[in-house]
Amino acid sequence: MVREAQDDCLVFFHAREDSSFRPMHTTPGFPTLAIVDHPLVQHKLTLLRDQHTPTKIFKELVDEIAMLMAYEATKDLPLEERSVETPLERTTGFHVAGKKLTLVPILRAGLGLVEGVLRLVPSARVGHIGLYRDHDTLTPVDYYFKIPGDAAERDFILLDPMLATGGSAVSAVDSLKRAGATRVRFLCLVAAPEGIRRLVAAHPDVQIYTASLDRELNEQGYILPGLGDAGDRLFGTR
Ligand code: PRP
Ligand code: URA
């Protein structure tokens, strides 16, 4: 269900006038990008993009997509063997080392992704990074940081619906690594090529999951075609 970017080739998708998707061109060098192109994710993402989708439905869709994407983003989590007694006999099963997984939403829009992921991994811890993008300079301003103490022992999934210039994502990963994190994934719904390039250049070890790689940024740093301001649409603050 995940279309892994090839080592040397990344297929960009671009919305056509008839709303179907087609490969546009290839770009070398994004081995850490995975595009979750499951039909349910793509269906729900299209509803999210619709400017007429109301806040309540927008929030529900973000939650559902987060859960579906978490399924893909956790598929290489380490398993521990454990013994289980069926009604017939004892056998060996598995147990996800879930308590070491830590979700870190980037405030505020990242909050919309937390519950959906937690539904799949309820024992995950949740840290928070507070960042906002200055409207004029587009550079991230950080205002809050709280994660569990044993960062080096943990697998982190940073959550943010939008990867635009990449400034917020790079700053968030910088902060996690300063705190001792060594294993970080980044899960977003919509990414711009500019943001992917910047995050890959700064943190080539971070696996990135997105539901869509969109076309470009506009002059205000919004993703095109995008879905608008994710925080405002989630919390109804437009
Ligand atoms: C949005 C989004 C990302 C950031 C992406 O947040 O949720 O955090 O912009 O942009 P970048 O890749 O160019 O840094 P915003 O700063 O609008 O804050 P909010 O979540 O509080 O609305
Ligand atoms: N932040 C958003 O919420 N949307 C964009 O398109 C870019 C940054």
Image (spheres, rainbow, N blue to C red):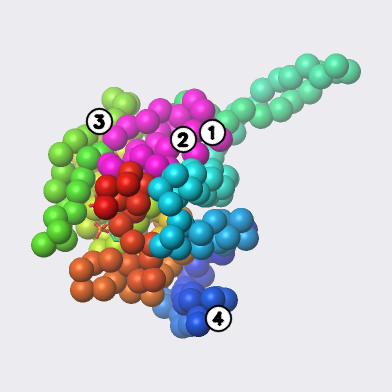
Q: Secondary structure at mark 3?
A: strand
Q: Are marks 2 and 1 in contact (CB under 8 Å)?
A: yes
Are the residues flagged by discs 1 and 3 in contact, CB closer than 8 Å? no
- Residue 25 part of the magenta segment: no
Q: Earlier in the sequence, mark 2 or mark 4?
A: 4
Whole-percent x and y of residue 133? 19, 54
Q: CA distance from mark 3 to mark 2?
A: 18 Å
Q: Which class describes the residues within 10 Å of circle 2: few (<14), some (14-19), or many (20+)?
A: some
Real-space Cα distance between discs 4 and 1? Answer: 35 Å
* Residue at left offset 51%, top offset 70%: 6
* Side (left or right) of 235 relative to 65: left
Comparing marks 4 and 1, which lies closer to the viewer? 4
**Residue 238 x, y percent position in the rendering:** 27, 52
Give the residue pinned by disc 3: 146
Among numbered discs 4 and 1, the one appearing first in the sequence: 4
Q: Which residues are magenta?
A: 100-128
Check the picture and name the quadrant holding the N terminus: bottom right
